[in-house]
Image (tube, grey):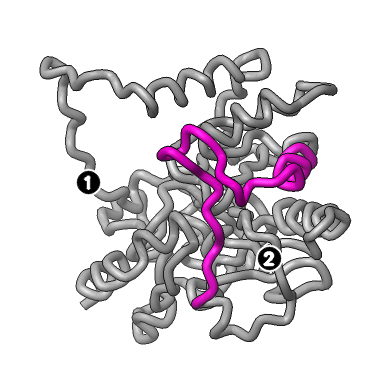
C-alpha cells in the first residue's frame, strides 16, 4: 500500500515540484494517514527501506534540537521549524505539500529576504515555494536535494497580494523568465529580479543560488559595481520559474556536510558556456558510457543520525 501511494504521489507531483506552475499534489503526509510511526527498533543501520517512503509520510518535526545531518541530497533535519504560512512580507505556497519546514537559519533568511523584496518597486514581498519536509530526507516526488532544511525555492513572480487563501496558493502559478530554452531572459525579467538575487547572494549565510543560464549572463552583462556576489549565482537546468537558494551549514553543525565552494571568479564565462551549448548543442557521443542505474536511497544509506530523526 505504501509503495502504491508513493507512486501515486510521484505521478501527480513530479513537474509541480520543479516549476511551481501546476496545481499541487496531494501531500505525502495526507496520502497515508494510517502509516505506522517510525520506531527506534525499526531504525537499525541495516534498514533497507526506501528512505522517501519513511520521511515522506512524517508530518511533524522531530522533538530534538535543530540540526542538519548529511548533505543536501542525502540527509535529514532534526528540530525543524515551520515558516508561517503567511507573514507581513511573504506567503508560503503549495501548502498541501507540507514543505514549508527548515532549519531556523533558513526561516530567518527567507523572512529577511522577503523584507528586502518588499522595498523593490512592484514587489510587496515573496511567494515562497518548497523548502523541506518536516524532517527533511528524500521526498516522494520532485527534488533530489532540499533534504537538510537548508534549501528554499523563491518564486520569480512578484506577489500581487499576500492574503491568498489556501486553495488559491494551490492553483496560482509562478511566471517563467526564460527565452530560447533558457539562453536568454524574456520580457518578464526586470532589474528588480537582479536586485533580489544580488541581495540573496550577498548574504553571508548563502552558499550558492541556482538559476537558469540566461539570467546569469544577463546579470553578468548588467552589473556595473562589485561583482563578487555573482560567484554564488550558478547556472542550472530549469530554475526559470523560481530560483533555488542553498545555505551553508550553520556554525557548529558538525553533522552537516557543505558542498564544495564555487570556483574562484564571477563564473560568467561558465554561464556563457551553458548558453552556447543551449544555442548550439553538441552532437551526441555514441561512445559515451551510459550512466549506471541508481535505485532509490535506502535508510541505511542516510547518515546514522537520520534514524533517530525519523524515530523521534
Depth check: 148 or 8 in front?
Answer: 8
Q: What's the residue at 27%, 67% (across, down)?
A: 11
Look at the image and give the residue range highlighted in magenta: 171-200
Q: Which residue is mark 2?
A: 81
* Snapshot quadrant of residue 34: bottom left
Secondary structure at badge 1 equals loop
Residue 14 image position (x, y, % from top left) = 34, 60
Depth check: 231 or 150 in front?
Answer: 231
Secondary structure at badge 2 equals strand
Q: Looking at the image, tell me whether mark 1 or mark 2 is earlier in sequence order.
A: 2
* Snapshot quadrant of residue 157: bottom right
Residue 282 image position (x, y, % from top left) = 28, 19
| Residue 176 on the magenta span | yes
* Residue 303 visible in the snapshot: no
Q: What's the residue at 55%, 48% (across, down)?
A: 177
| Above or below: residue 179 compared with residue 142 | above
Q: What's the residue at 36%, 66% (across, down)?
A: 13
The N terminus, quarter of image: bottom left
Residue 51's tag is none
Amino acid at each position: 500500500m505504501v509503495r502504491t501511494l508513493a507512486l501515486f504521489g510521484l505521478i501527480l507531483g513530479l513537474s509541480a515540484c520543479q516549476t511551481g506552475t501546476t496545481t499541487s499534489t496531494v501531500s505525502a503526509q495526507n496520502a497515508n494517514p494510517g502509516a505506522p510511526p517510525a520506531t527506534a527498533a525499526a531504525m537499525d543501520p541495516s534498514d533497507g527501506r526506501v528512505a522517501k517512503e519513511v520521511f515522506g509520510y512524517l508530518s511533524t518535526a522531530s522533538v530534538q534540537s535543530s540540526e542538519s545531518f548529511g548533505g543536501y541530497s542525502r540527509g535529514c533535519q532534526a528540530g525543524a521549524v515551520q515558516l508561517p504560512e503567511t507573514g507581513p512580507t511573504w506567503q508560503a505556497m503549495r501548502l498541501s505539500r507540507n514543505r514549508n519546514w527548515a532549519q531556523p537559519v533558513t526561516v530567518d533568511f527567507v523572512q529577511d529576504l522577503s523584507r528586502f523584496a518588499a522595498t523593490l518597486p512592484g514587489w510587496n514581498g515573496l511567494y515562497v515555494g518548497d523548502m523541506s519536509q518536516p524532517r527533511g530526507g528524500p521526498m516522494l516526488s520532485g527534488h533530489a536535494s532540499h533534504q537538510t532544511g537548508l534549501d528554499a525555492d523563491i518564486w520569480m513572480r512578484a506577489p500581487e497580494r499576500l492574503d491568498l487563501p489556501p486553495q488559491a496558493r494551490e492553483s496560482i502559478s509562478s511566471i517563467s523568465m526564460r527565452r530560447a530554452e533558457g539562453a536568454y531572459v524574456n520580457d518578464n525579467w526586470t532589474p528588480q529580479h537582479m536586485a533580489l538575487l544580488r541581495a540573496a547572494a550577498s548574504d553571508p549565510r548563502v552558499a550558492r543560488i541556482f538559476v537558469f543560464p540566461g539570467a546569469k549572463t544577463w546579470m553578468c552583462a548588467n552589473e556595473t559595481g562589485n561583482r563578487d556576489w555573482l560567484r554564488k549565482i550558478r547556472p542550472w537546468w530549469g530554475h526559470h520559474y523560481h530560483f533555488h537558494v542553498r545555505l551553508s551549514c550553520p556554525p557548529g553543525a558538525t553533522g552537516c556536510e557543505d558542498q564544495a565552494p564555487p570556483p574562484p571568479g564571477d563564473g560568467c564565462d561558465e554561464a556563457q558556456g551553458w548558453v552556447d551549448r543551449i544555442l548550439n548543442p553538441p552532437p551526441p557521443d555514441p561512445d559515451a558510457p551510459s550512466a549506471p542505474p541508481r535505485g532509490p536511497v535506502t535508510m541505511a544509506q542516510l547518515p546514522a543520525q537520520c534514524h533517530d530523526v525519523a524515530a523521534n
